[in-house]
Image (cartoon, rainbow, N blue to C red):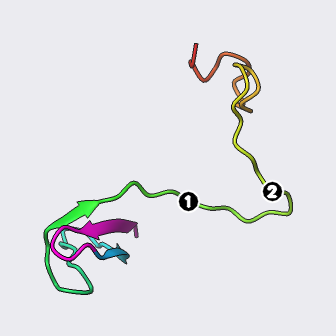
Amino acid sequence: MPIHEYSCQACGHDFETLVRGSETAACESCGSTDLGKKLSVFATQGEKSATAQTAACGTCGNPGGPGACRFN
């Protein structure tokens, strides 16, 4: 079941909630359904710390090899 992140347009509260099927999410602070869906990101846990790659094409780690990410 997907967890969605929202920002309440009425009170500004940011929260995440489980949304099942055709349910409509409501702000857990004020109860408003006037919500803006936020871009969700995920986190992973590992032994090494990851850093963002800003180098030229071919070093992003795309399993398709250099140029596979199509950022030419």
Foreground label between 2 and 1: 2
Q: Position of residue 3 (x, y in %)?
A: 40, 69
Label tally: 2
Where residue 49 is drawn, which disc sits there?
Answer: 2
Disc 2 packing (10 Å; few <14; some 14–19; many ≥20): few
Q: Is residue 65 above or below residue 10?
A: above
User: Which image quarter is the C terminus in?
Assistant: top right
The stretch drawn in magenta includes residue 33: no
Magenta stretch, residue numbers: 1-12
Where residue 33 is drawn, which disc sits there?
Answer: none
Of residue 59 and residue 68, the one placed in the foreground of this image is 59
The stretch drawn in magenta includes residue 9: yes
Which residue is drawn at the image coordinates 18% and 67% (left, top)? 9
Specify the farthest residue to the front. Answer: 12
Q: Is residue 27 above or below residue 47?
A: below
Which residue is drawn at the image coordinates 60% and 23% (left, top)? 69
When asked about the image quadrant of residue 34, the answer is bottom left
At label 2, the amino acid type is Ser
- Seen in the image, is 54 located left or right of residue 18? right
Disc 1 packing (10 Å; few <14; some 14–19; many ≥20): few
Element under label 2?
loop
When asked about the image quadrant of residue 20, the answer is bottom left
Element under label 1?
loop
- Seen in the image, is 23 located left or right of residue 71? left
Where residue 42 is drawn, which disc sits there?
Answer: 1
Which residue is drawn at the image coordinates 71% and 31% (left, top)? 60
Sequence-first tag of 2 and 1:
1
- Seen in the image, is 42 located left or right of residue 56? left
Q: Position of residue 68 (x, y in %)?
A: 64, 20
When asked about the image quadrant of residue 18, the answer is bottom left
